Image (cartoon, rainbow, N blue to C red):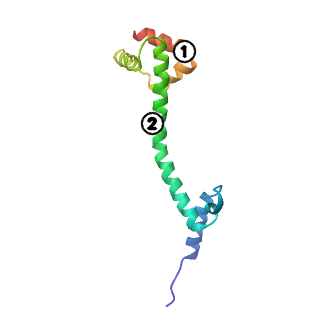
Amino acid sequence: MPRSVNSVAKRARRKKVLKQAKGYFGRRKNVWTVAKNAVDKAMLYAYRDRKAKKRTFRSLWIMRINAAARQEGLSYSQFMGKIKTSEIGLNRKVLADLAMNNPEAFKAIVEKVK
């Protein structure tokens, strides 16, 4: 009995990967073996960096809060400690946004926790 090969599924798989590799440079966009490796690596980077993005944004918020708090005479750790004890329910994202875009409101928060 002859060997049965599912060429339709094989072509669909390859087409899917080559579609994902669209825009890549050189053989990475049109040669199956190279494109498959490039797409696999890109997917790993995408997965990893979705987690890293959260860390980098948190560190950015901390830097912004620290800079704004120091202008008011407090360090970041002192400010965050006082925020927790005064039970102000603002997270770092909101505090950083206030520090950047609404310094008066941030200053009011600092005065409230001092």
- Numbered label attached to residue 26: none
For residue 39, above or below residue 75 = below
What amino acid type is highlighted by mark number 1? Pro
Q: Position of residue 24 (x, y in %)?
A: 63, 56
Q: What residue occupies the far left of the structure in this picture?
A: 85
Cα gap from disc 2 to disc 1, whole angstroms: 24 Å
- Numbered label attached to residue 103: 1
**Could you tell me which secondary element the residue under label 2 belongs to?**
helix
What amino acid type is highlighted by mark number 2? Arg
Q: What residue occupies the far front of the structure in this picture?
A: 26
Asked where in the image residue 104 lies, by quadrant, the reply is top right
Q: Residue at x 47, y 25 (%)?
A: 63
Q: Nearest the camera: 5 or 39? A: 39
Q: Position of residue 100 (x, y in %)?
A: 55, 21
Q: Residue at x 63, y 63 (%)?
A: 27
Q: Label 1 crowding class (10 Å Cα cut-off): few <14, some 14-19, many 20+?
A: some
For residue 25, above or below residue 61 = below
Q: Quadrant of the C terminus?
A: top left
Q: Label 2 crowding class (10 Å Cα cut-off): few <14, some 14-19, many 20+?
A: few
Q: Mark 2 highlights which residue?
A: 55
Asked where in the image residue 33 lies, by quadrant, the reply is bottom right
Q: Position of residue 79 (x, y in %)?
A: 40, 17
Task: Give whichever of discs 2 and 1 has the lower sequence position.
Answer: 2
87 relative position to 10: left or right: left
**Could you tell me which secondary element the residue under label 1 belongs to?**
helix
